[in-house]
Structures are given as structure tokens and as C-alpha cells.
Image (cartoon, grey):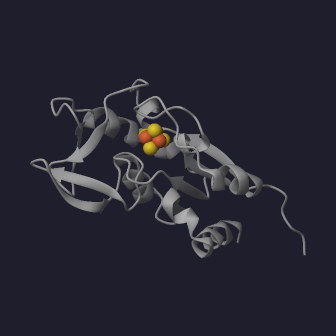
Amino acid sequence: MAISKIKPLVGVSQCLLGDAVRYDGKSKANQIILEQLTAVFNLVAVCPEVEAGLPIPRPPVQLTGSIQNPKLTGRDDPTIDVTDIMQRYCQTKPAELKHLAGFIFKSRSPSCGLNSTPVFIDGKCVTETSRGIFAKKLCASYPCLVVIEDIELENKTTLDNFIQSIIT
Ligand code: SF4
């Protein structure tokens, strides 16, 4: 049986690759990605907040006001509102990623979280299982995309299933 030597293209939240793109000017390097997944995938780095035009460092933001249709506002300064900037980015970016077979998202992020992002209404956390604005848009654009978030990679069975789903 012929085995393809071409590695599948898989998107990844850029901070997980060790790039210092987070709001605090740091990275969130993930050793499973760097040591295991780079061997089987060609990884495509995406940082929605930086690509949307936000600086490094930048004020931290969070999802607020609604679970279904949240805003992206400042965690420490609620007058900061970057919802429109992120929504504009999300209108065009998914079309550039149509060649991806999968995506590895950074958990809990208001932009990248897959099933782990908190939403706050009137200062209170009303859920911790929501989806970041970019992750939501990308998954809606490509319902068959194989997706996972970093915290799930620690489960060997889940990790193996993710790899197999893409390779097969
Ligand atoms: S979680 Fe997403 S938006 Fe935040 S730094 Fe990482 S890649 Fe960028």
C-alpha cells in the first residue's frame, strides 16, 4: 500500500508554538505539539488577535454580555471593545484556511478557545464552556474540520484519535 509522505496541513493557535504573541507578550509553548505533532503535520500558525491588528502586548480581553453573541471587551478596562476588529478579521480569514485538515486551538481564549472559554455578564461568569470568536467562525465555516484544543492533547487516546482522524 502506498503511504503518502505529504504531511497534512493543520492550523494551530500561534502561541502554542512558542511564539510570544499573547496579550502579556509571552507564549504558551506546548511540548506535545512541538515534540510530537510537528513530526506528523505541517503546522500553520494563526494568531487571530495579532492578525486582526492588535498589538503585543495588549490589554487582556474576555467574552461579555451574551453567551450566543458575546462582545470582546477589556478584562481590566471594560471600555475597551475590540469586537468589531475581531469580527471583521473573522469575515475574511477562514477563506484563507480552506486547505487545512484540522486545527489545534488554545483553550480558554476569548478568540481561540474551542469548548472552554468563559463568558461574563454583569461581571459574573455565566459559563466556562463557550467558544472564542475566531474558533466559532472557523468551525462554522468548515463543519468537517477536525478540531481539538491544547488541554485535550494530554489525553493519549484523544490525541491518537485526533491524529488518526486527520491522517485517514
Ligand atoms: S490564544 Fe489565540 S489570539 Fe490568543 S495569543 Fe494565542 S493564538 Fe493569539
Figure check: 59 above or below 14: above
Q: In this view, does 159 lie to the left or right of 126?
A: right
Percent x, y of residue 135 = 41, 52
| Quarter assignment of residue 96 | top right
Residue 98 position within the rendered picture, expressed as x and y whole percent measured from the top left: 56, 50
Please tell me which residue is depicted at 38% across the width and 27% down the height of the picture.
Answer: 54
Instruction: Report if residue 145 is visible in the image.
Output: no
How many numbered tags mark residues here?
0
Q: In this view, does 11 lie above or below 164?
A: above
Question: Quarter for ligand 1?
Answer: top left
| Left or right of residue 117: residue 80 | left
x and y percentages locating residue 111 in the rendered image? 37, 45
43 shown above or below 148: above
Closer to us: 122 or 138: 122
Between 117 and 132, the one nearer to me in the picture:
117
Q: Is residue 123 left or right of residue 103?
A: left
Give coordinates of residue 35: x percent, y percent.
72, 52
Residue shown at 42% from the left, 49% from the top: 112
From this viewpoint, is residue 45 visible? yes
Question: Image quadrant of residue 48?
Answer: top left
In which quadrant will I find the C terminus? bottom right
**Residue lying farthest to the right in this orientation:** 1
**Which residue sits at x=51%, y=62%?**
148
Residue 124 position (above or below residue 157):
above
Q: In which quarter of the image is the N terminus?
A: bottom right
